[in-house]
Amino acid sequence: MSDERYSFVVVSNRLPVDRVVDEAGNASWKQSPGGLVTALEPVMRAADGAWVGWAGQADVDLEPFDNAGIRIVPVPLSESDLELYYEGFSNDTLWPLYHDVIAQPSYHREWWDRYVQVNRRFADAVARISDDAATVWVQDYQLQLVPAMLRERRPDLLIGFFNHIPFPAYGIFSQLPWRTQIVDGLLGADVVGFQRVADAGNFSRAVRRLKGYATKTPYIDVPGVDGGASRRVIARAFPISIDTRSFEELAARPDVQERAAQIRHDLGNPKTILLGVDRLDYTKGIGHRLKAYGELLEDGRLSVEDVTLVQVATPSRERVESYRQLRDEIELTVGRINGDFGTISHQAISYLHHGFPREEMAALYVAADVMLVTALRDGMNLVAKEYVAARADEDGVLILSEFTGASDELRAALLVNPHDIDGVKDAILRAIEMPRQERRKRMRSLRKKVAENDVNHWSDTFLATLDGSRARIGWGGAEPLDALEWTIERPPRS
């Protein structure tokens, strides 16, 4: 076991497989849905790859195993780790902070302690299995310390990091008591990737303010220690996407098309179906969307006989108090709107608080006339791209928040500021009344963009940039771990 070494290693908080235990207690593994797995699977098979991550269940210590040609290396997390590292620091400190403090972050030293410990555990697992000069790709905000921890242990490695969520402006990021340690952690990578150009710029500004290093887009010069060689880190945008072809083929299947027609029939064949698909998260702007729709009904500008809103709200982080409160608020609003405007034969809102398989989601996209994406802040938002990929009929209208990463690419959507309720209402009416010719022109433009920049283009571009950095960046001069101050900067006691 200890002799296993791999030339390409991906590390993420969760493994790309889910552990399923049947009624008899027998465990098996099922590949998780998602574009990241799809994009990296062929690369990992060709490059003798391994994937390091948590198996999704607390207090389960599993041996490495093979799944679909990929070596899976589980990292164990205890119930306490989940409470402090994951639900605490990752999702109640970093998540709200990185999403522009839509909700107030909590700063607890015990959470930070555990975040450091768990990041070190992941880094140790990667260091053990990485071959000489291997390529390591670290994924997302839960593991921001891993690049520097890896560089201290294994300066021979080529290290990439990709942040799937936004990176905030310095005025917000500076609130974090451990801001310098996070920046030091990320600068351990050779390439640091972000969803938007603005995110990469925010990171570079944080480096200048906190470290004083020279930056010239997309480069950051990291000085060596004690006269050692400096390193040049690349920080730039690599917008993530979906497996476009796979999703197009799924949506075109006869059974999916039949299901889409059935959905319309079951909803009473309204003239217009509005659709929202989100995790139940305060960043998604679900409440703003419901407010705009409710006011349109109240104003008499829409009628429940003609228009239905289908809102899919996938359960998320239900052990976190702010998420439980959000669910109560959303369901109260849905109940009020349905009570005020629904009829015996027509519901104003069809609200679904559970997840659906990909086939059902594709059918919903095909059935919907208008897709509502009103996120208050979002790294990318792949739902918007899935809707576009599903619309081979070149019909349908996408209403898209300008605060999503997707809005940088999908300019032919109706772009809205979700805080401007009147603007959202006007966009909904414009989408409903839009002539067929304009709908087709816009959707054709959107589909061209999604087809060109699919998830394979994203992974290929990132890995090509990372591989190209190997020739330019020296391996020497890594700061020793102690110098990066992984110890706690003590904020006021919380």
Image (tube, rainbow, N blue to C red):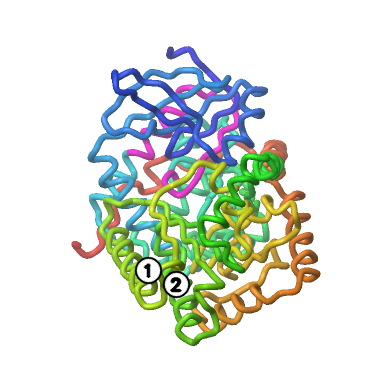
- Disc 1 residue crowd, few under 14, some 14–19, many 20+, Cα 10 Å: many
Residue depicted at x 38% and y 71%: 338
Reply above or below: 226 against 71: below
Q: Cβ–Cβ below 8 Å for labels 2 and 1?
A: yes
Kind of element beneath mark 2? helix
Q: Nearer the viewer, mark 2 or mark 1?
A: 1
Q: Is residue 226 visible?
A: no
The residue at the point 29 percent across, 18 percent down is: 24
Marking on residue 144? none
Q: What range is drawn magenta here?
A: 118-143
Q: Nearer the viewer, residue 458 or 208?
A: 458
* Drawn side of residue 109 relative to residue 213, left or right: left
Residue 450 visible in the picture: yes
Q: Amino acid at mark 1?
A: Val
Query: Which residue is denoted by mark 2 in the rendering?
Result: 290
Could you say where residue 158 lies in the image, as x and y percent from the top left?
60, 34
Q: Crowding near pointer 2: few (<14 within 10 Å), some, many (20+)?
A: many
Amino acid type at circle 2 is: Leu
| Quarter assignment of residue 136 | top right
User: Which residue occupies 40% across, 40% down?
Assistant: 481
Q: Which residue is mark 1?
A: 334
- How far across and how far down the image is residue 234, in percent? 64, 50
